[in-house]
Amino acid sequence: MIWNVTPEIHNVNNITPLAVHCKATGASKSGQDRYHIGMKSPSFDAEITQFIKRYLELSGLSTAASVAQQRIDYETIVRQFTYPHPAGIRTEDSVLPGRHGDIPLRHYYYGSGDDRALIMFLHGGGFILGSLDSHDDICAELCASTGFNLVSVDYRLSPEYLHPVYLDDVEDAFLGLGHANTVLVGASAGGTLAAALSHRLKSSPLRATGQVLIYPGLGGDRYALDSYRDNAEAPLLTTRDIHYYRGTRCANGVLPTDDPEFYPLAASDYRGTPSTIAFSADVDPLRDDARSYVAKLQAADVSASWINEPGLVHDYLRARHVSRVAAAAFARICNAIAQLAG
């Protein structure tokens, strides 16, 4: 069964602060207790179980394969979990000049378009996968659900391009678009890039209004966060996969682990970061990246909330039409964007 989800937009007064979410998932409000959910017996409902099974059967996507083969396998997943654009969506492709060459963009408009805010979307794919097409239907639904114009950025990928070329592309796109009320939205590697861009632009005259990070990788492996052990063998993304992806970003696998543009959790000062709502999947090695990042922002008096989604796995955006739980999570993402856009 396909769940047709175009969430209603309303005030997001039900976004719970970090401390309440910690209490709900087993950590103390003070954050001093160890945070354990565990990988021994993850609880998935029948719809998510079927989604995981289908996802794995379709492609056999594996980081043990060559980058070229991974890109072929990823395209198989994308094709199988792509849905038609909502009625009223129109798109337009363009290019914007950047310091490393032209940057392809895809613009989304719902009806006559609402330019009071701009959503700048950064796709996921471990920095080696993804394109304007890989998250096209997701972008269309975000645009239709919020009503705001959206631009998706096709940044350069690794290993052909190494750190920080992809971030340069994202910065050039942001400054080139030049919208005074921009909400950054990034999924997985795109969430990494959104947080890195926000750090880079902290002192810039033009900064994002807010950022919505969806299961972002922020450098939690550097700090041995619990979720990297608890969810080490999680479906669709393992801790081993994360180590592989991070290594493709740098020459000879030498990681600049103290660089907040590589690992946003490594920053020493979070003042000036835009208001943030970070989403995580409970059964995902990256879960605690979002939790830790939000805690650091709150300690710096930045408005920030963490939304942890029980019973979901990495890349759950692709399950939004086959799972009630994922559909509800997607609706919360849309509402978060609308809230930050003001």
Image (cartoon, rainbow, N blue to C red):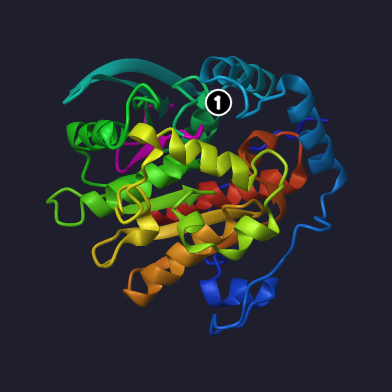
Residue drawn at (83%, 41%) of the image: 49
- Residue 119 lies in what quarter of the image? top left
Q: In which quarter of the image is the N terminus?
A: top right
Left or right for 227, reference 184: right
Q: Looking at the image, which residue sits at the far front?
A: 252
Q: Position of residue 103 (x, y in %)?
A: 27, 21
Q: Which amino acid does label 1 sit on?
A: Asp
Q: Where is residue 319 in the image (x, y as percent from the top left)?
A: 70, 36
Q: Is 71 contained in the magenta span?
A: no
Residue drawn at (52%, 64%) of the image: 291
**How many labels, in total?**
1
Q: Out of 310 and 220, give the one closest to the viewer.
A: 220
Q: Quadrant of the C terminus?
A: bottom left
Residue drawn at (53%, 72%) of the image: 18
Q: Out of 67 and 331, give the one closest to the viewer.
A: 67
Examine the rendering and report whether any part of residue 12 can be seen. no
- Residue 274 lies in what quarter of the image? bottom left
The crowding category of the residue bearing disc 1, from other C-alpha atoms within 10 Å (few below 14, some 14 to 19, many at least 20), is: some
Say if 221 sits above or below 56 in the image: below
Query: Where does the magenta region start and end?
Result: 110-126
Say if 142 sits above or below 304 in the image: above
Examine the rendering and report whether any part of residue 200 can be seen. yes
- Residue hosting label 1: 137
Q: Is 111 contained in the magenta span?
A: yes
* Dot 1: element: helix
Q: Position of residue 287 (x, y in %)?
A: 59, 57
Task: Give the overall secondary structure of the magenta segment.
Answer: loop
Q: Position of residue 81 (x, y in %)?
A: 67, 25
Left or right for 307, reference 109: right
Q: Looking at the image, which residue sits at the far right?
A: 46
